[in-house]
Amino acid sequence: MRGETLTGHSSARDLLSGRGTPYLPAMEQTSETFSDRVLGFTIPDRDARGRSVRLDGSLEKILEAHDYPPAIKHLLAEALTIATLMGALLKGDGSQLTLQAQTEGGVVDLLVCDYRDGELRGYVKHDAQRLDELGANPSLAALFGKGYLAVTFDLPSTKQRYQGVVPLEGDSLASACEAYFAQSEQLPTLIRIGVKSGPLGTVAGGLLIQHLAEGEVGRERLHVRLDHPEWEHVATMAGSTRHEELVDPELSMEALVWRLFHEEREVRVEPGSALSRGCRCTVEHFTDVLSRFPETERDDMRDETGAIVVDCAFCSRKFPIPA
């Protein structure tokens, strides 16, 4: 990997992701990915691509903005990990992936998080009193009631926006996102998420892998089937990922991928973006947004000093915007 060579024959299929470098066993690596950076990988012979990530310091900075109870902290950590895995599939500077869950009758009123160029944001609004009544480990149905998950891709390079909406069903947000890819993108997808909280903070890890069927990059995607033999093999291997592996700070992302797919002829990895909390709130940004409102509406927003105070839910800071 990273300029090293790997046993095996090179071919056009080695460029499945458009670029990348061969992967070597852990003992031959010169640098590994442990936390707060995405690792991309492809398995050319199986027409599969994937992403792996572990969130540590970046996750803590987002969670510490609010005094979330454990169940909500776990939920947001899961959502941010999924947003990272999905967002890291996008190409082009400024491309953004947004996950937004809204509910009907759920304890969670709103969950929103996004990923853009390695920057993460996330926020959960919930009913604290009703949450206390659910116990320590509430189910997805208990948290969201009749809920829906909206997945939005913003692609500034083409000035396009795509959005898909799926019911919040199943055991987790990950299963809802798998359903999104199957229904909206026709991409067989497996997602595994692990979250661990302790005295030193919260760590979350995730693995996403997809089957590109008969369509490598630049070719038409044909015969998308959940029972495709190549996909069944890859999904079985990836599905064996354990929660403990995803959150183990001593296990690199490369080593995790190697454990799962070391029997393959070749696995190619490509280090992705470094990750950080990316709240984009500034006085300049809010001033620009407020300038789009009619003057009469801005007058109604002003306090006794004449300023408009904007409360950013993502970072829990208040920004007084002068008249």
Image (cartoon, helix red, strand yellow):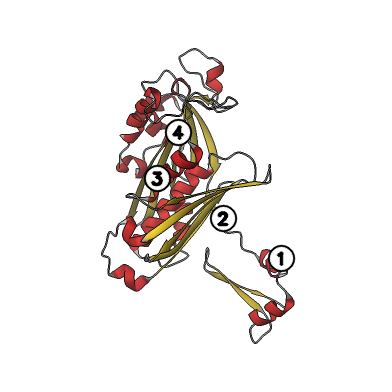
Quick one: label 1 or label 4, which is nearer the N terminus? 4
Label 2: which residue? 278
* Front of the two marks 3 and 1: 1
Q: CA distance from mark 3 to mark 1?
A: 36 Å
Would residue 282 be found to the left or right of residue 87 on screen? right
Quick one: label 1 or label 2, which is nearer the N terminus? 2
Amino acid type of the residue tagged 3 in the rendering: Gly
- Say if 142 sits above or below 165 in the image: below
Amino acid type of the residue tagged 4 in the rendering: Gln
Amino acid type of the residue tagged 1 in the rendering: Asp
**Picture coordinates of residue 140 (x, y %)?**
34, 56
**Picture coordinates of residue 193 (x, y %)?**
37, 45
Quick one: label 3 or label 4, which is nearer the N terminus? 3
Q: Secondary structure at mark 3?
A: strand
The foreground one among 321 and 60 is 321
Quick one: label 3 or label 1, which is nearer the N terminus? 3
- Report if residue 38 is visible in the image: yes
Q: CA distance from mark 2 to mark 3?
A: 19 Å
In the picture, the disc for residue 205 is 3
Label 1: which residue? 288
Amino acid type of the residue tagged 2 in the rendering: Gly
* Front of the two marks 1 and 2: 1
Label 4: which residue? 210
* Extreme residue in the left direction: 135
